[in-house]
Image: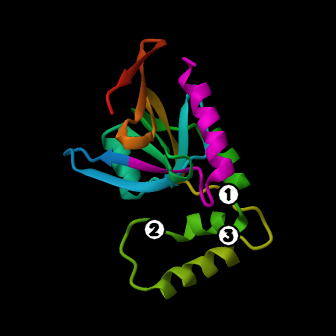
Amino acid sequence: MTDPFALFDEWYAQARETELNDSNAMALATADAQGRPSVRMVLLKGHGPDGFIFYTNFEGRKAGDLLANPHAALLFHWKSVRRQIRIEGSVGPVDDATADAYFATRSRDSQLGAWASDQSRPLPSRAVFMDRYEEVRARFEGGPVPRPPHWSGFRLTPERIEFWQDREHRLHERRVFSRQENAWNEGLLYP
């Protein structure tokens, strides 16, 4: 198979059947404008040949890193199938229609939480956050919850995708795909 997106779909489908929790969880590595790295877990919410989508509060560190330095890396690690996929590429915001459509699928409590949270900022106590949540809940009671202006998504457009398969005696299999203009080149890497 020489299409990295078809191979991703195959591996992702298997992981969704075997991973107990959050088969769509991925580590997202970013670096700020000074090159200081940061990594955290996020959830994949869309994917295809145009890229891999995740959502966040645009006022937090993650979004700040991505807006200052629009390059990132993703890592899926599925222990149950002994596989991982590394993806590197450029990052940009999704359009408003895409963000609105996804936000509408979230549970009402998650929508309200997006309004109540000052993501990544110091929080004096859990009670402060819960009070803000209750204020937001009352504000939107009886009506739809619109997407907050500070909340949207990013799409990572891959330039490199590596598929790693665990093998006995650390004789792992590593397949790498690199984008060259509009085509993908495939190769192997030593374990």
Percent position of residue 75, x then y: 43, 44
Q: Quadrant of residue 141?
A: bottom right
Label 2 vs 3, first from the N-terminus: 3
Q: Is 34 covered by the magenta stretch?
A: no
Q: CA distance from mark 3 to mark 1?
A: 12 Å
- Tags 1 and 2 in contact by the CB under 8 Å rule? no
Percent position of residue 78, x then y: 52, 49
Percent position of residue 113, x then y: 59, 69
Q: Residues within 10 Å of mark 3 (few under 14, many from 20)?
A: few
Quarter that holds the N terminus: top right
Q: Residue furthest right?
A: 142
Q: CA distance from mark 2 to mark 3?
A: 16 Å
Q: Residue at x 44, y 65 (%)?
A: 119
Q: Amino acid at mark 3?
A: Asp
- Tags 2 and 3 in contact by the CB under 8 Å rule? no
Q: Secondary structure at mark 1?
A: loop
Let me know if residue 81 appears in the view: yes
Which contiguous range is marked in magenta? 1-28
Q: Which residue is mark 1?
A: 146
Q: Amino acid at mark 2?
A: Asp
Q: Residues within 10 Å of mark 1 (few under 14, many from 20)?
A: few
Q: CA distance from mark 1 to mark 2?
A: 17 Å
Which one is in front, 85 or 124?
Answer: 85
Q: Which residue is mark 3?
A: 109
Horizontal side, residue 75 vs residue 133: left or right:
left
Q: Residue furthest front?
A: 169
Q: Which residue is mark 2?
A: 118
Nearer the observer: mark 2 or 3; the answer is: 3
Which one is in front, 103 or 82?
Answer: 82
The answer to whether residue 114 is above or below residue 154 is: below
